[in-house]
Amino acid sequence: MKKLSIILAFLLIFVACSSKKETSEKKVYKIGTDVIFAPFEFEKDGKYVGIDIEILDAIAKAEGFEYTLSPMNFNGLIPAISSDQLDGAIAGMTITDERKEVLDFSEGYYESGISAVVSAKNDKINSADDFKGKTFAVKKGTTGSLYAEDKQKELGSQIRYFDDSPSMFQEVANGNADITFEDYPVIAYKLSLEKEPTLKIVGDKLSTAHFGFAVKKGQNQELLEKFNSGLKKIKESGEYDKILNNYK
Amino acid sequence: MLELFLKSLPAFGKGILITLEITIFALIFATVIGLVVGLINIGKNKIFKAIAKIYIDLVRGTPLIVQAFFLYFGMTGALKFQIRPEVAGIIVISLNAGAYMAEIFRGGIQSIDVGQMEAARSLGLPYSKAMIKVILPQAFKNMIPSILNQFIISLKDTSILTVIGVAELTQSGQVIIGRTYKSFEIWTMVGILYFILIYLLSTVFRKIEVKLNV
Amino acid sequence: MISVKGLIKKYGNNTVLKGIDFLVEENQVVSLIGPSGSGKSTLLRCLNGLEEATEGHIFVNSSDITDVKLNINHFRENVGMVFQSFNLFPHLSVIDNITLAPISLKKMNKSDAEELALQLLEQVGLKEKAYVYPNSLSGGQKQRVAIARALAMKPQIMLFDEPTSALDPEMVGEVLQVMKNLAVKHGMTMIVVTHEMGFAREVCDKVVFMADGRIVEEGKPQDIFDNPQNERTKEFLSKIL
């Protein structure tokens, strides 16, 4: 019985410590990002790099705040923000009206849009007219999945959901699904790195959108202001363009 | 909350159907695999026994999610064939549950008094007939609690198949949250739905057990 | 009918049967007696192949059990066995216990087999128990059913491995009576491992005394019981009679 009480005591202390918010000391923000979404965030030599990561880092330095990075599957980010597990997220997240119902976004920091992507060997799908009846692979919680869902009825298509971009791309490359919808810069970056691409883009951009830094609606407003202010600063100083150039 | 539930019901319904479909098919295959491998492990053929041991050790020594990824993304890519994720799901769960069922069968059969087999063989019954008519019927009654347990475990295991794109119950929850952002409500509902499914399953099995014991 | 020559049985380094020569004629009733560990059950179990001989030969009606080419299942249809712990099949009714083997091995169709089963149950005095399950029977009743079950295959030889050792004293008599009827009225060839010396004396044609894995002495019941020659035999008998 004594051993049990000691173990319980340790557990309670552990839980208390991990949920303690730093009120007296300087706040360290917990900021989430996607596990893999190159060139915006990805792991290289044990560290996280990418456009989002470098922008966040530059802004944090310019505005003088500290943060820790929490990579997780994209579809976990918004729930984590909503339940106060994260203070914010930068993850190639498109600003949409639906998301604005639960999040507050910064100014758009990157222009994007969705493209349709098929297997490099697929010569049957050449434009949006060929989407009918095909199988779509999408990533849970993304605007790509929203696009597929909106079009599903009219195209009579099947949708398969995956947790991350690599699984989604693999599905199309393997031939188990016909099309995926991904942010244009991501697929363009992936294709630029491959000597023998397994995928290809079909047609023009299907939409135009902007990425934004997100916080919980009505909260962490000072963090949001710092992001906007910092973004302005790094754009003026030319650092923003430098970061983007790193990933061309 | 009720409105959210009613709106989500069709999606949940589809998810439940897929969950049940995969579980039932997988368990039928797993029972066959389990019986065959269990009998091999009781028998005397050393080569078959070695193969069976490798199979069981591999399944028990790797996480189910890794097995799912390996089969669906790894093997299909490397060997260049296509299967539907649900089929891959059935295969993965069959092989997984089959390994555990093999141990259940082996234990169940070995728990039957050796005198039963001796009496059956002494009457002139060959090993196979003695197994089918005398040993297995008795062993099966003893194994029902363990088989039910595996049924429940496998049903819950199907939730992992969301990572290979299977539209089972857990994934249906994820997709709804992706659109509505109502994590707490949706996960509560999904949890309750799983609970009801498993409760119904347990009740059916318990009725079977009672009937067999009478 | 049964001819055992130079039978040796080892379990690893332990030699349980150290060279047995043993003969049983047709219609003979033979009892194997001796202290525990003498190898009598092992010898009995070698006779229907439940134990495999390490060395030596066992001929039953010109079939050599020790020959690997022998179809042991066919062989066993002809040799019935009754066990100390009955080994009835608990999931089958009494009549199904008896008809299982004849029907499965296609010796008979269902109605013929059931008719035979009821006859055999009558013979052992349990016809009214045909449709109950073994767990409702007493020990003596179970053993009588076990005897009927073995007889359903119409064997030429019946082996009994301490058939009454697990029974309460009041029930020993009913089983021994069945066995006596089998020997006397039906002329069955029987080999019985037993401690029931009364049965051995009254019903058996030959008594075989074993100790330490060997046959020490054998002969007619009155010779063995009243006039044992060997010291070891005398020692054993003095302790139990």
Image: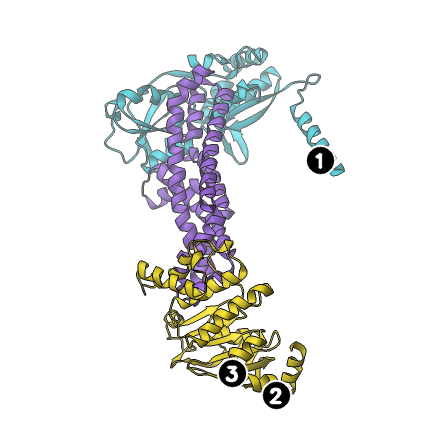
Chain letter for the part of the structure drawn in purple: B
Q: Colour of chain A?
A: cyan
Q: Secondary structure at mark 3?
A: strand
Q: Are marks 3 and 1 on the same chain?
A: no
Q: Which comes sooner in the sequence, label 3 or label 2?
A: 3
Q: Are marks 3 and 1 in contact (CB under 8 Å)?
A: no
According to the colouring, which chain is yellow?
C
The correct choice, above or below, for B16 with respect to B129 in the image is above
Q: Which residue is mark 3?
A: C206
Mark 2 lies on residue = C227
Q: Is residue A17 above or below residue B39?
A: above
Residue A101 in the figure: left or right of residue B10:
right
Residue A158 marker: none
Which of the pair C165/A133 is nearer the observer?
Answer: C165
Residue B143 screen position, x and y as percent: 48, 48
Determine the secondary structure under disc 2. Answer: loop
Mark closer to the observer (3, 1): 3
Identify the chain of the residue marked 1, using the numbered disc in the image: A
Residue B210 point in image, percent of width and height:
47, 42
* The one of A114 and C16 positioned closer to us in this rendering: C16
Query: Which amino acid lies under the numbered mark 2 shown in the image of this protein?
Result: Asn
Please name the amino acid that badge 3 sits on.
Lys
Mark 3–mark 2 Cα distance, whole angstroms, equals: 14 Å
